Image (tube, rainbow, N blue to C red):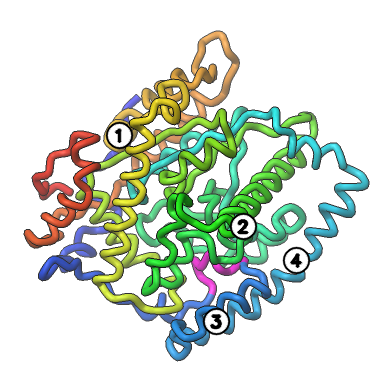
Amino acid sequence: MKGFDETTSTRTDSAATAQRSKDGVYMFHPEPKHILNSCLKNNPLSGVSLSVFIEMTWKNKKSIQWGRYWHRLLALFLMSSFNSILSAIELIYIYGYLFIFRKSILGNAQNQHQKDPVFVLGHPRTGTTLLHGLLALDKERFAICDTFMVGFPHCFLWFEKVGKFLFRNILSETRPMDNMKLHFDLPQEDELGTNLLSGLGVSPYSSLVFMKEEQKYRQYQTMKDVSDKDLDRWVASFSYFIWKIRIRDLLQNKSRNTPKQLVLKSPCHTGRVRLLLKLFPNAKFVFIHRNPYEVFLSGAHLASTTYGWMFLQSPTDQELQEYILKQGEILYNEYIDCRKDTSLLHEENCVEIGFEQLTKNPSESMKEIYSRFGFDSFDEDVNSRFPNILGKEVQELKGYKRNKFRHVQLDDKLKREIQDRWNNQFETFDYDKKYATSC
């Protein structure tokens, strides 16, 4: 099966033509007016509860740029009030109706003998979304958390159908950074939901709101050096979210007594292999990597086009660049350390795949993953619809053309910094340190 057509970018290269670095600092696009003036559009805080919103604004009252983002804060205050009502109804639904009439579902969702999740790992912009989406096509095997569930984790069990219609205009039709389709039913990063449930204080995704202070959230990339209180807070929220995802799966598939295996993706999980294996000893991991220069350039494009939808303070170019580079250091260094310990990651629970390999031959990449994990969907004597569904999806994606950055000019100082700080990536996955103009 042929791969995706990647000859040019769906976004014209003109978007990148003026981009360059000066004195070692990448020149990011300033916030466009339509993003700066937005309130809830593409904003993952839209599902925040009132108590969390009040706590967030109180703790960060001195750092929030009230004059610049007052309209966004007002909209979030009103939305959080509504979300708290929805959350209260959800609790009544779970511990009232489900506990009385469907108690077996609650127990089955908590059953510790079910299969542990498959986690998609990788730095942002390495192809984790594509890989996650392809795996999620196997609906016979996997359950997912979708975009609505992570956006409104307090209320999706009872409110999902109404909410997807009511809030349909909150999302753009395509993702701001790459023109891939975007809607509430697509698989999405579970960390977004965990961040809201945990109160926005123990997740690295809070950096995307308070980018000027992202240093204080770095510890949550790996969860290795956090306090016991913060760790317990994150684990409790993550476990609760997983439980609710499994409840939803059972409610949608009433003929089964156990939920399907979860396939989950959040780039920050790349630095949490040790913790995830403690929570799920039989978890499986699919790690995807990509040329570090492409990762940086695509990450800079992501920051320029997407982060502004959620800012409550405006960072400098230097702060945005440091966030991207530091995130790469933390995630890759921790993953590579785990990779060296065969008691953690080994052939039976981890598959590594390159972005180019996935895009050039997605079907063979899926076969490799399934073969390594002992999944039988590609066996000829197994009646599975997944290979056909995968083939159709690949055909549809052939028209998609990823972003190219041929005209981006990086000065030697920034190139050297990328090489030095991401040296682990270059060497471990055998990428050439020469800056390619085809990036």
Q: Residues within 10 Å of mark 3 (few under 14, many from 20)?
A: some
- Disc 1 marks which amino acid? Gly
| Secondary structure type for disc 1 | strand
Distance Cα–Cα, label 4 vs label 1: 42 Å
Determine whether 125 is above or below 313 in the image: above
Q: Which residues are magenta?
A: 40-47
- Disc 3 marks which amino acid? Leu
Distance Cα–Cα, label 1 vs label 3: 41 Å
Q: Position of residue 198 (x, y in %)?
A: 61, 61
**Residue bearing mark 4:** 86
Q: Specify the quadrant that holds the N terminus.
A: top left
Between tags 3 and 2, which lies in front? Answer: 2
Please give the name of the residue rendered at 54% of the width and 17% of the height, measured from the top-left corner: 376
**Residue bearing mark 3:** 73
| Secondary structure type for disc 2 | helix
**Residue bearing mark 1:** 354
